[in-house]
Amino acid sequence: MVAAKETGGNGREIANRLASECSPPPDWEKPEVAGGGFVNYRAMPRAVATALQELRRDPSLGVPKTTNPETIVVDFSSPNIAKSMHVGHIRSTLLGDTLARMLGRLGHRVIRINHLGDWGTQFGKLLLAYRAAGRPPIDPDHAIDQLEEFYKKGHQEAESDPAKMEKARAELAALQSGDPERIRDWKLFCQRSSDHFREIYRQLGVTFDLEKGESAYHEELPALVEELLHSKIASVSQGAVVVANPEISEEPFLIRKSDGAFLYGTTDLAALRSRIRDLKADRIIYVTDGRQQLHFRWLFNTAEKWGQHAELEHVWFGTILGPDRKPLKSRDGTPIKLSELLREAKERASVILREKRPDLSGNQLSEKAELLGIASLKYADQLPGRNLDYVFTWEKLLAFDGNTAPYILNAYVRTRSILRKACLTMTPNHPLMLEEPAEEELARQLLLYGDAVVLAASERKPHHLCGYLYAVAGMYHRFFEACPVLQAPSTALRDSRLTLVGLTGDILRDGLTLLGIRTLEEM
Ligand code: ARG
């Protein structure tokens, strides 16, 4: 049809010529011409079998390596010190982790960075209340709750009393100019908060290559702002330093306040430069919620004027909503803490499992419940397109039928149990015979795995991979109903089906791993 347009010829005629002159490879049907110039080639089951046999031999299961490997920084999770991680951080943490896994799998050099918020204005108010209370010890078991209490107190006092606000500012200034006692307190806050974050990352199975907070850049900020002023990228406006980006918004990008304080954006400029200069990043991906879109447009635009060369991407996501379609909150109206959410996921999974497997010991049950609970949460969070807000419901995400982690894990577990019954520990390598429609359908779907990973990675949208795995699980269940494996009519067919079952399991496990989800061998 393209050729017809360009040459003014007839699409149907060109298609007929193509079909008669470009003969299909062996085991492909003769092409058919359809519509105004479509040429359809269709693989026969034998061609599918051959291709799947090749996939079986490929350790990467058909996921290609990029021809253009890059050094990619993924900046994700990045919670703020002295505040608990709340439900809003889960999407950044999971999405960033999955993107890093997928991009690494495609052959990029990925650097995972946790850009901790450890230098913000919250420390003025926090220090104010903490010092007024006589700098008490911080109990490691309740550190975040304690720190949040101090922050709340300091915030309330400062907001209601201008003299206290002045004091909070002075606290912040003292910290930022390096007063040893304040630095000691600040380090303690950071330490205790990191312990809390680390425990959550442990439960989620998320790691970083670099934990480098905002404070790491603070010494560079004065010179950076001077440099931008000097090169006329920034200018002084009402005592503050700003970068005008009229092509984006009337409001400018603020990089130094009139009182001399630096901002979130100033730090981001320094971090960006360091990632390009020191880490040799070709590309930086920032994963945050959609409300920061303007910030990143300002940042990227300023970086470009400043001559910082790298591909810059803001991969943003929508909000998690409660049943009332308002941002998900706990009963008392505060944001739900991530630690609570993880605990509840495990508890609920444990109730469901206890019913299904009354034979499990307490230890086995809690181990499986932890895995299943976290898997369900992770899957449900990555399933909706990332730009959408989604409504969170426990019942839906833990269901064994529907597009859920339990459903897909159940398919995986069934593949493993058949292999076990056949005394196999890994996928055999027998010739494939695709006789029943259900096995042919499954085989064709397995061949699309590489495409699904490439699509999800290149669009930065893990939900494509979820959709793919859900389809595989559904086709596998249908195959399982329609095609006896261990009782297959012939040994050759039994062997072929065992190979197909094994490959299905390999692909389900591989895909779930890319989504950061662990599998289990038995439900
Ligand atoms: N700390 C920020 C927050 O909790 C996210 C930081 C994202 N990364 C960045 N380089 N700005 O919202």
Image (cartoon, rainbow, N blue to C red):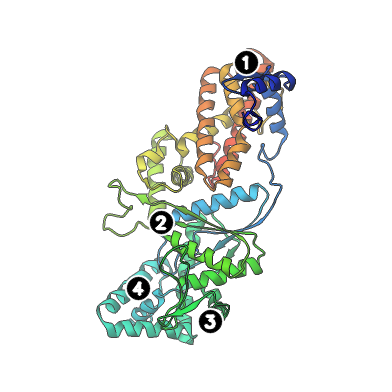
- The vertical placement of 455 against 489, above or below, is below
Disc 2 residue lies near ligand 1 with CB under 8 A: yes
**Going by the picture, which residue comes out furthest to the left?**
160
**Please, what is the three-letter code of the amino acid marked with disc 2?**
Gly
Work out whether mark 1 precedes mark 4 in sequence or the reverse, and give the earlier one. 4
Circles 3 and 2: CB atoms closer than 8 Å: no
Q: Which residue is mark 3?
A: 222
Q: Residue at x 31, y 55 (%)?
A: 329
Q: Nearer the viewer, mark 3 or mark 2?
A: 3
Q: Nearer the viewer, mark 3 or mark 1?
A: 3
The CA span between labels 3 and 4 is 28 Å
Element under label 1?
loop
The CA span between labels 3 and 1 is 71 Å
Work out whether mark 3 precedes mark 1 in sequence or the reverse, and give the earlier one. 3
Residue 291 x %, y %: 41, 58
**Does 453 sit left or right of 250 as displayed?**
right
Work out whether mark 2 precedes mark 1 in sequence or the reverse, and give the earlier one. 2
Q: Nearer the viewer, mark 2 or mark 4?
A: 2
Residues packed near mark 2 inside 10 Å, few (<14), some (14 to 19) or many (20 plus): many
Q: Which residue is mark 2?
A: 88
Q: Which residue is mark 1?
A: 435
Circles 2 and 4: CB atoms closer than 8 Å: no
Name the foreground residue: 155 vs 298. Answer: 298
**Please, what is the three-letter code of the amino acid marked with disc 3?**
Pro
Q: Which residue is mark 4?
A: 151
Work out whether mark 3 precedes mark 2 in sequence or the reverse, and give the earlier one. 2
Q: Nearer the viewer, mark 3 or mark 4?
A: 3
**Residue 148 seen in the figure:** yes
**Please, what is the three-letter code of the amino acid marked with disc 1?**
Glu
The CA span between labels 2 and 1 is 49 Å
